Amino acid sequence: MSTIARGRIESGNILLDVAIKHGKGVKIIHNSKDHICLSIGEDAIKDDLTDDKYYGLIYDHILPLIPLDVNSEAILNQYKIKILRKIILEEIKLFLAENRLLARRALFSPYYFLLNHYRRKALLFVFLRQYFKFLARESLENIPYDVLNTTISLLIADGYLKRPYYDDKVGLGNRSLGIKSSPIDMLLNTVPYLSLLNLRVDIKSILKIISLLTTRISISDDLDLEEKVSQYAFLETDKGLSSLTIDLPFSIPYKQKIRLGGIINTAYLIEDENRGTYVLKKYHEWSGLKWLPIALWSLGAYYFDTSAKRRLLNEYSMNRDLKDLGFKVPGIYYVNLRDKFVVEEYVQGSLFRDVIIEGLTRGKMLDIIEIVLSEIAKVHKCGIVLGDANPTNIIVNNDQQDVFFIDLEQARYGNKSSWDLAILFFFTA
C-alpha cells in the first residue's frame, strides 16, 4: 500500500510514527523500546469518522500528529478539519442533552469541544485516563490554530455555531438549537464504546499501541481535564463573561449579614471587604423529601423542578431573557454550577406585598400597584409566565418606581398567565 501522509507524536524519548496508506486496517509495523510505527489505512479513518467502527480510537490519534513533510501537512490538516467537525457536533448534541436551558446563553472557547471530548473518554475508560490526558495535551499543542479556526468558520456557515460579541468565543447557532437531544441520547452515545468488550481483530492493533504507549509515556497530574473544560465554557453576567471556574467577583472571604429566608432555596445578604452588598442564593436538592408535594402545593409551585442545578439554570436563563426584553431584574454577578448558587445584585426597595397592604389600608400607593400590574401584563404579552408571582418576589424601587422581578426559577414560556394572577391574589388575600 502506498503512503498518503506521514505524521509523528513525540513524548519524551518515545516516538510514534504513523503512516496513512491506501487501503484498510490498522497494523503495527515496528515496535522497539523507544520507537513504534503504525500503519493506518485511509478506509479505516473514513469508517471511524462515519460509523465509529474503531470507537474514535483511530481519529483520536490523527489529531495530535505532527506532519513530517509539506504534502503530509496539507493532507493531515484536511483530516483534522473533518475530525474536529465530527467531535464538535457530537459535543454540541451532548451539551444540549445535559444543559438545554443554557443552549442560547452559553459561550465557548473553540478548545472547549476538543477538551470535553477527551474528558468524556477519560471518564468512560478509567483505566486509560492518563492516556486520554496525553492525547488531549498533544492535540492542544499540535492542532494548528488556522485548522481549528477553519473548522469553526465552516460550522458557523452551516448554522451550527455563531460568533457573538466576543471574537474569540462561539455560541450555539439556530441549527444546533433545533437539535432534539435528551439524557437518553447521552446514554445511547456511550453504548457503542461498551461493546469494546467484544473486540474485533482489526481493532487490537490500535489497542496494543495504546497499551504500549501507556506504559512508556509520563503525564503529570497537573493537567486536570475537568478544570480545563470549565475554563473554556462561559456565561455572560452583569460583570462580563465568567468562566465556570472563576473566583467570586468580590473579595473573599465575604461576611454573611442576614439570612433572607427561603424554604425551597436559601438566600443570604452578604458583604465583601469593600462593603459591597450582594444576595447569595443557594439552591437545594428536593428529590428525597417525603413532604415535597404538600409543601409545593402550599407554596404555590407552578413548574417546580427537584434538581437544584436545573432550577439555577432556569433562573439564570429567564433573568437574562427578561433583561433583554427591557424588564428590571437583579444583576447576576456570578454563577456556580458545581456548588449550585448565584450571586446577585441586592435590590433595595419595598416588597410588592407591603405596597399592597399600605394601598389597601391607607389608600396610598394605588398608582404603584397599577404600575406593577401593568408590568406583569407586559411580561405575559411576551409569552412568559412568572410561575411564582408571590408579591414577595416583586420589589418596587421607591425612588424610581421601577418594578423588579426576582426569584425566577419557576418562570417559563407559556400562556398560563392566569396562574400568575391566581398566585398573586392568593398570597395577597
Image: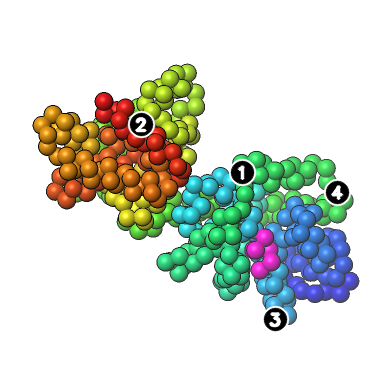
Nearer to us of marks 2 and 4 is: 2
Q: Secondary structure at mark 2?
A: helix
Nearer to us of marks 2 and 1 is: 2
Question: Label 2 crowding class (10 Å Cα cut-off): few <14, some 14-19, many 20+?
Answer: some
Gap between marks 1 and 3 measured at Cα:
43 Å
Nearer to us of marks 1 and 3 is: 1
Above or below — where is 67 with respect to 257? Answer: below
Q: How many marks?
A: 4
Question: Where does label 1 land, which residue?
Answer: 182
Q: Are marks 2 and 3 in contact (CB under 8 Å)?
A: no
Gap between marks 2 and 4 measured at Cα:
63 Å
Q: Residue at x 21, y 40 (%)?
A: 369
Q: Residue at x 22, y 49 (%)?
A: 402
Question: Label 1 crowding class (10 Å Cα cut-off): few <14, some 14-19, many 20+?
Answer: some
Instruction: Return the disc, 1 or 3, that comes first in the chain's sequence.
Output: 3
Instruction: Return the disc, 4 or 1, that comes first in the chain's sequence.
Output: 1
Gap between marks 2 and 3 measured at Cα:
71 Å
The way the protein has been coloured in the rendering is: rainbow
Nearer to us of marks 2 and 3 is: 2
Image coordinates of residue 244 in percent, x first then y, are 44, 50
Q: Secondary structure at mark 3?
A: helix
Instruction: Return the disc, 2 or 1, that comes first in the chain's sequence.
Output: 1
Gap between marks 3 and 4 measured at Cα:
35 Å
- Highlighted range, magenta: 81-86
Question: Label 4 crowding class (10 Å Cα cut-off): few <14, some 14-19, many 20+?
Answer: few
Question: Where does label 4 land, which residue?
Answer: 200
What is the three-letter code of the residue carrying label 4?
Arg
Image coordinates of residue 99 in percent, x first then y, are 52, 46
Q: Are marks 2 and 4 in contact (CB under 8 Å)?
A: no
Q: Residue at x 65, y 40 (%)?
A: 184
Question: Where does label 3 land, which residue?
Answer: 70
Question: Where does label 2 land, which residue?
Answer: 422
